[in-house]
Image (spheres, rainbow, N blue to C red):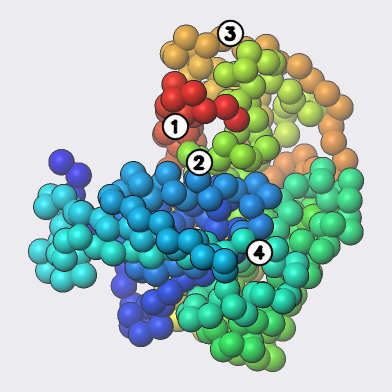
């Protein structure tokens, strides 16, 4: 039987964090965070702001329906999902009255809105006590194709949300940055590495990190920029990143496309470790990290060729393969080597990744395989 395990608690959390807002909350990381927070009774009220360009309201509905009885209340402004969750007695903490009530009520309010448009954000964030900002344009290639769109989505959208946090006195803002601002710095990357972005995407992330620093220093908004490495895991069906792309190609009977030799390296991070890091950033009261970037990664360097070998083993065990791999020229703006020193995250957030690549890939593969068996097409 699964045993309930408590998560970190703090005075800051109990006093302030009652309603968490997530921009881009219908995306891959947003949905996983919602599930993680509900599973751990981190909060009972959530706001999701999403433009529905990638995520789908059905995704949050399906995720919540896995956890209990769900009712949906729609109006002109938003859709409210009310989850009545019944706890398994084996999962209940005897000394935690918040979890002993049955059923537990969780509310998720979903607003359709593009944060690049300032008007309307105030209405959506009413009552929020923290913002996890995941919305934005996420591709290097897309940013090179249309730098202006990348700027609008990432810089203007982020500044709009920061301004609302300042105006409405929302005390905390967690920004999803990446390693892209650092560009060609010698690995392992760390927070003191000098940024040298290779793409408009990296430049836009670096600009928002600067605004995070300014809004903490000038206005007291407790900002933290988390630089995520290459994130993968369940619920990534809409992602175009390398692991998701490889698995979807396998199911479609297509070859795996590698840009370059395959000797380029990345730091692959399982999504549940991201959820833990974001939760730690919401809870911390460490004044030394507000307004600063912090790398969140596995700290392990893996070549794309090695990744293919691990995925092929999973495919063969399920009756797929052998795999065909084709090579295309390396793409502009992408780093040759990328892995990260996570010492600062360990010291300041108490962050220690729990998922190695083999275990994370296995869970990710099982999720995709289950979706394929259910007839889902990605």
Pick whichever, 267 or 50, lies toward us: 50
Instruction: Point out the tag, 1 or 4, that comes first from the N-terminus.
Output: 4
Q: Nearer the viewer, mark 1 or mark 4?
A: 4
Check if mark 2's residue and mark 1's residue have beta carbons within 8 Å.
yes
Q: Are marks 2 and 3 in contact (CB under 8 Å)?
A: no
Residue 360 in view here: yes
- Tell me, yes or no, if residue 226 can be seen here: no
Residue 281 vertical placement versus 81 (above, below): below
Mark before the other along the chain sequence, 2 or 1? 2
Is residue 293 positioned above or below 288 on the image? above
Chain-order first, disc 3 or disc 1: 3
Neighbour tally class for label 3: few under 14, some 14-19, many 20 plus, Cα within 10 Å: few
Asked whether 89 or 48 is in front, the reply is 48
Q: Residues within 10 Å of mark 1 (few under 14, many from 20)?
A: some
Query: Disc 3 marks which residue?
Result: 322
Which residue is labeled 4 in the image?
113
State if disc 4 and disc 3 touch (CB < 8 Å): no
Q: Examine the rendered structure and indicate whether residue 324 appears above or below residue 170.
A: above
| Residue sitting at x 16%, y 50% | 88
Q: Earlier in the sequence, mark 2 or mark 3?
A: 2
Q: Residue at x 35, y 68 (%)?
A: 44
- What label does residue 275 carry, if any? none
Check disc 4 and report its element: helix, strand or loop: loop
| Earlier-in-chain disc, 2 versus 4 | 4
Q: Which residue is mark 1?
A: 367
Mark 2 → mark 1, Cα distance in angstroms: 8 Å
Label 2 belongs to which residue? 235
Question: What whole-number distance in Å separates the C-alpha atoms at marks 3 and 4?
Answer: 44 Å
Residue at image coords 70%, 67%: 115
Q: Quadrant of residue 267?
A: top right
Q: CB atoms at circles 3 and 1 under 8 Å apart?
A: no
């Amino acid at each position: 039987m699964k045993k309930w395990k408590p998560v970190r608690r703090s005075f800051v959390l109990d006093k302030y964090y009652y309603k968490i807002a997530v921009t881009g909350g219908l995306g891959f990381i947003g949905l996983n965070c919602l599930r993680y927070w509900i599973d751990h009774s981190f909060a009972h009220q959530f706001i999701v702001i999403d433009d529905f360009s990638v995520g789908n309201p059905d995704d949050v509905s399906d995720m919540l329906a896995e956890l209990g009885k769900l009712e949906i209340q729609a109006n002109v402004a938003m859709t409210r999902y009310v989850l009545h969750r019944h706890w398994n007695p084996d999962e209940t903490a005897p000394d935690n009255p918040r979890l002993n009530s049955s059923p537990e009520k969780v509310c998720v309010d979903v607003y359709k809105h593009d944060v690049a448009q300032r008007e309307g954000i105030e209405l959506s964030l009413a009552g929020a006590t923290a913002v996890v900002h995941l919305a934005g344009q996420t591709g290097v290639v897309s940013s090179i194709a249309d730098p202006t769109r990348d700027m609008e989505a990432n810089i203007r959208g982020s500044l709009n949300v920061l301004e609302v946090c300042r105006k409405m006195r929302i005390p905390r803002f967690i920004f999803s940055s990446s390693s892209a601002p650092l560009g060609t710095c010698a690995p392992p990357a760390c927070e003191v590495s000098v940024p040298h972005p290779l793409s408009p995407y990296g430049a836009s992330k670096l600009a928002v990190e600067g605004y995070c620093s300014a809004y903490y220093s000038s206005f007291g908004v407790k900002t933290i920029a988390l630089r995520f490495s290459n994130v993968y895991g369940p619920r990534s069906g809409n992602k175009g990143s390398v692991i998701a792309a490889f698995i979807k190609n396998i199911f479609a009977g297509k070859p795996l496309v590698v840009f370059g030799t395959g000797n380029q390296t990345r730091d692959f991070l399982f999504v549940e470790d991201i959820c833990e890091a974001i939760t730690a950033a919401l809870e911390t009261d460490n004044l030394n990290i507000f307004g600063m970037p912090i790398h969140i990664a596995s700290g392990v360097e893996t070549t794309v060729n090695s990744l293919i070998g691990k995925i092929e083993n999973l495919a063969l065990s399920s009756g797929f393969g052998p795999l065909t791999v084709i090579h295309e020229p390396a793409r502009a703006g992408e780093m040759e080597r990328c892995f990260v020193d996570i010492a600062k995250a360990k010291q300041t957030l108490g962050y220690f990744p729990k998922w190695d690549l083999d275990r994370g890939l296995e869970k990710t593969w099982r999720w995709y395989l289950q979706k394929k068996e259910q007839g889902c097409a990605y």
